[in-house]
């Protein structure tokens, strides 16, 4: 059986963005830490799934002790405006948008993007759950707008197209489905902008 | 006196983005080219200022033979809409926007940006010429909108602020002064976007 | 108290080469893994210090079950040549040299380099233990050569100078203390080589 | 016919390491320079082939006014040791080695490397001229050593192999043919070194 050093290296090698060399450096870093630190990390890992749940409503991960039940503090907060639902690809996108302070409505974590030419989008992302959530909220009269906050790349665009098509019947009866604005992002220089960005920046000028 | 190799290296070293090593490689590259090529390049350089002018109206560089006089083909073309004037920092920005096909109005090349805390903005860029151009066109009743197409960085923002302040008296009488739209540019991922970009992308959603 | 997500992010943020964004991605990656995987990782961490020891002789980390006692399999192997001792900065260097198959003698992990102008080198690295190890082996008649296998940077050179000075009395009585050869490393292009590398490559030509 | 701006952009686009965007920036940079500067650059280009020759002996480029005839100052200098000849791929390699001050003998510029599987090496580089130069100098009793100072990459290694094979008959009669030493180059860290570099660094330890 492989040594603990080898086994840990193999596990860290599968962490996002980590190659075998850095995985090995992680192990030696841990070997140089006091046992107290390793025990603390192990304790957190052991309890992670007990203490963190996926929210029943928005599907982001949240610490259980924050609320009594199966929904996160954001979804449980009745003061938060129900009129808009912002759809993101993943938890870190939600964290980043929340941190910006620019959005104060409700969220839904799709759990991925739909690649172009994907045969089974339903299996890739939470499409069925999203549709149910939107239909319920819309029928209840609360929801006015779904904001698709997806990255500006081919898979993000494909996902937005797919979601707009799938929500078409609700858009016909008044639900607004919007996309994030396109234009110059912070730091963009005109000399290096592509035609689409220039086109959008001109269209959205103000 | 320095050898031609040293002299040419020194000249290329001042080309934008070129260090001493690459400057030297340029010289050896040229030494490996046939004399016909060097003579052609030298001929183009000798005639460059004779054959290329700065347009009297938009101040971009243009090949003289394209039009009879002191103005470029874009400024000479009476079919081009006079109602909007797009202000850019430099010629390559104009080229890039023109290539995008997203804008078909008139241009003005400012010749630079105004750095934050700049003491003498008038000496840095063509402020006086821009004001005269705008006032003339606006008084003549042609100009409706000035579009500030500047890069989304601190100097670009500072320049836009300065130009808006300097055009305030015309804005009060109906001239529209607009900025390029901000939001996600092509390729932007939400995970790595800053708060300003997210804020603008949400504000400009559609 | 911070949530498990925050606490784990904070711990991963201190892993070598990891910033806050990637630390957070690690946590979401783990949240998406089955509980079985997290329990396995926790188990390995809990036992790490029990199952991995620092070798009494070479000071590298080694899995305890590999040998009965306090020394690693390399140090326990009596067939390994005692005539040379290779001194490295850290465990990963030892792993990399071992993997190259180019060295089959004995090792010593110094535990760091001595920075230039360091006031207390004895506290930074295992200087005292290295001296004792070398003196014991040399007096016993086994050791003929100490190879300082340190990185080719200022701290590595400073450490080599310090070790050579500290071993001077043994060098006078016949112990060879050598440094790794300098020259072109794989992939080095002459156009971009510094003067020292060229000098060494010429001196070591063969 | 294309405008001077387009023509110059096209020429600069073929400079080593330059893409179309940077080529265009070069043209606008030149348009912003005074005519005096452009005339000076053009003058240097016009005279480049008149004032710089390829040395008959070492085949590097040299300014003609430095010596009376067809050979460069290095080859004309009778005080320079004739006992060693250093073979380099290209002029910049020679410049870099010369600048290091580590070599004071004679040079030969091969004019390229021989790619692996190359069918016609004779047409790629100055093989015939190199053989003639070596044979003449060796028969005259001056030359003792040929140093192959080629980059540490597959094409460099292939060229060295080819040259050693081609010089084999002279090596049998006493000519030394050496390769630059391999090992750690400045800045190399052991953690990231490949097996070949470690092997060579151990072999060349001193």
Image (cartoon, coloured by chain):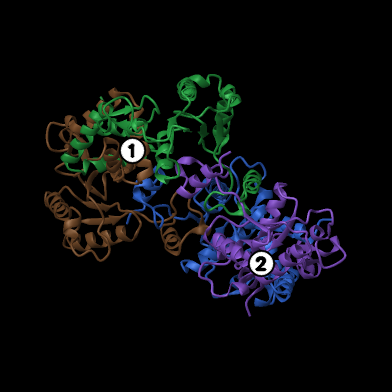
Chain colours: A blue, B brown, C purple, D green
Is residue D31 in view from this perspective? yes
- Residue at image location 58% in from the left, 54% down from the top: D189
Residue at the spot of label 1: D23
* Quarter of the picture holding the N terminus of chain C: bottom right
Quarter where residue B38 is shown? top left
Q: Is residue D21 left or right of residue B68?
A: right
Q: Label 1 near label 2: C-beta < 8 Å?
A: no
- The residue lying toward the viewer, choosing from B88 and C113, is C113
Which chain hosts label 2?
Answer: A
Please tell me whether mark 1 sits on a helix, a strand or a loop: helix
Determine whether B124 is above or below C189 in the image.
Answer: below
Quarter where residue C34 is shown? bottom right
- Residue at image location 52% in from the left, 47% down from the top: C200
Percent position of residue B167, x then y: 19, 60
Residue at the spot of label 2: A55
Which chain hosts label 1?
Answer: D
Please tell me whether mark 2 sits on a helix, a strand or a loop: loop
- Residue at image location 49% in from the left, 46% down from the top: C199
């Amino acid at each position: 059986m492989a040594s603990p050093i080898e086994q840990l290296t193999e596990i860290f090698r599968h962490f996002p963005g980590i190659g075998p060399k850095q995985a090995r450096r992680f192990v030696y870093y841990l070997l140089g830490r006091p046992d107290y630190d390793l025990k603390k990390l192990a304790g957190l890992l052991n309890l992670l799934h007990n203490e963190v749940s996926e929210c029943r409503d928005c599907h982001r991960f949240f610490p259980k002790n924050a609320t009594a039940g199966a929904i996160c503090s954001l979804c449980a907060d009745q003061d938060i405006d129900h009129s808009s639902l912002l759809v993101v690809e993943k938890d870190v996108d939600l964290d980043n948008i929340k941190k910006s302070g620019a959005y104060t409505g409700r969220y839904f974590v799709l759990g991925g993007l739909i690649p172009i030419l994907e045969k089974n989008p339903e299996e890739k992302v939470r499409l069925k759950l999203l549709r149910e959530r939107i239909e319920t909220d819309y029928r209840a009269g609360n929801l006015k707008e779904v904001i698709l906050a997806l990255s500006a790349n081919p898979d993000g665009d494909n996902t937005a197209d797919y979601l707009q098509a799938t929500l078409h019947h609700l858009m016909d009866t008044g639900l607004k489905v919007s996309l994030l604005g396109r234009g110059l992002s912070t730091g963009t220089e005109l000399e290096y902008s592509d035609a689409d960005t220039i086109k959008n920046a001109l269209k959205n000028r103000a």
